[in-house]
Image (cartoon, rainbow, N blue to C red):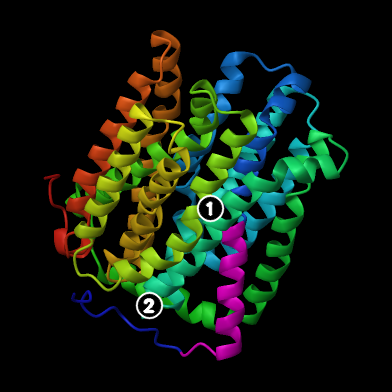
Amino acid sequence: MNTMPDFPKNRLTLPKSLGVLLIIAIILASLNLRPAVTSLGALLDLVIEDLQMNGFVAGMITGIPPLCFALLGPLAPRLAGKRGPELVVVAAMAAVPLGIALRSVAPGTGFFLLCTALALAGIAVGNILMPVLVKRWFPEKVGIATGAYTTAVALGASGVAGIAVPVNQMLGGNWRVGLGFWGLLALVALVLWVVVYFGLKNQIGHHQQQAKTDTQAADLGPMSKNSTAWWVALFFGGQSAVAYIFMGWLPKIFIDFGASPAFAGSLLAILLGVGVPLSFVMPALAAKFANQAPLVIVNGVVGMIAIIGMLIAPLQYAVLWVVLLGICGSNFPLALTMIGLKARTAAGVSRLSTFGQSAGYLLAFPGPFLVGVLHEVTGSWTAPMLLIAGLIIFQTLVGVMAGLPRYIEDAQRQEIL
């Protein structure tokens, strides 16, 4: 079990108090990278009914998040290159509560989708820049720091999915209030990031200059011609497709298998909840390996067991199957850790994060739609489950390649393998 070769160290020591404040800010920002999505999923029926959405528009909502992440994510490095990632995260944390608040008062479907896109734009930027901030400020603790923020992402997703309905009922049962409530969490993150930005202003200036130097020193070439970047992107896309399929369809799958709506909803909460501790463990574990392929293979085998089990005995061992799917879902923090490990500098991580997540989310976007189409055409969940099985095999194969001990800088201008 060998660690990856040396990473560049910060050339300016970060005061301990500021370092603690920064990691808290990163964790709090990460907590806000999913609630705008999962809270909407939990209250979707109420939103559809009130805004009188047709089936096509309602179906689009499940696919909008990865599409927005793919299309809007590339804006992050361009903005960060000019203003620094810290200031851009401040703007992203402002976009999230603003979008959540505005969509809660949306008079119609068009404005609702537009405001949702605004919140998702902030989330997309946060998705891209979290690995960059970790590499920039904690280069010797990539695994631990990545584990902290991916755990926060998982906690934000599972926690809100589990309590969104009770919170909405507690607030009077009005979906507008229930959705708007989660903007308060993002508002707290915004305030803390403003404090962090001004507290780190001198250090930020130093790192911004170093980032320019690293960018000039490393002629990476286009990521689209870098084989390592493509393997990471394909792995990220494969695991994202499976994740968004289950976030959108898992309750309905089990309801159609005969489960009660309450039990089916709890199964999704369990699946997401399993990811909370694993989101901390997996990055730290991955950072200890030069080659992350064995971890990918284990997750793939576990995922296939779950799919086979759901096809053979879906209800009898339902909790076991979703726990196994949750373990397989730890490919998400693993993919994010790879982004931090497969580049030598923060500038390289920024390029890889942008390409890997944007291309990956774009590949993931059709997944939820294809599942719905297959179910509609066949009237069964067998074909959709076989599609999911294929995606798990796909992400395992490309993940093995992505996990090989190499850097994007070592594959400059290579053609895709």
The answer to whether residue 411 is above or below residue 56 is below
Majority secondary structure in the magenta region? helix
What x and y, as percent, mark residue 172? 88, 39
Instruction: Specify whether 302 is left or right of 47.
Output: left
State which tag comes first along the sequence, 2 or 1. 2
Label 1 sits on residue: 273
Depth check: give the residue in front, 203 or 2.
2
The answer to whether residue 408 is above or below residue 110 is below
Instruction: Specify whether 197 is left or right of 304.
Output: right
Label 1's element? helix
Q: Are marks 2 and 1 in contact (CB under 8 Å)?
A: no
Q: Give the farthest residue toward the front.
A: 316
Depth check: give the residue in front, 226 or 296.
296
Label 2's element? loop
Residue shown at the point (44%, 34%) measured from the top left: 316
- Near mark 1 (Cα within 10 A), the count class, few <14, some 14-19 or many ≥20, is many
Please give the label number shown on residue 48: none
Toward which corner of the image does residue 283 lie, by quadrant?
bottom left
What x and y, as percent, mark residue 147? 44, 67
The answer to whether residue 138 is above or below residue 26 is below
Residue shown at the point (78%, 22%) measured from the top left: 50
Amino acid type assigned to the residue bearing label 2 in the image: Pro
Residue 89 showing in the rendered view: yes
On-image quarter of the N terminus: bottom left
Residue shown at the point (48%, 81%) measured from the top left: 206
Where are the magenta residues, as a range?
13-31
What x and y, as percent, mark residue 65? 53, 38
Please give the label number shown on residue 139: 2
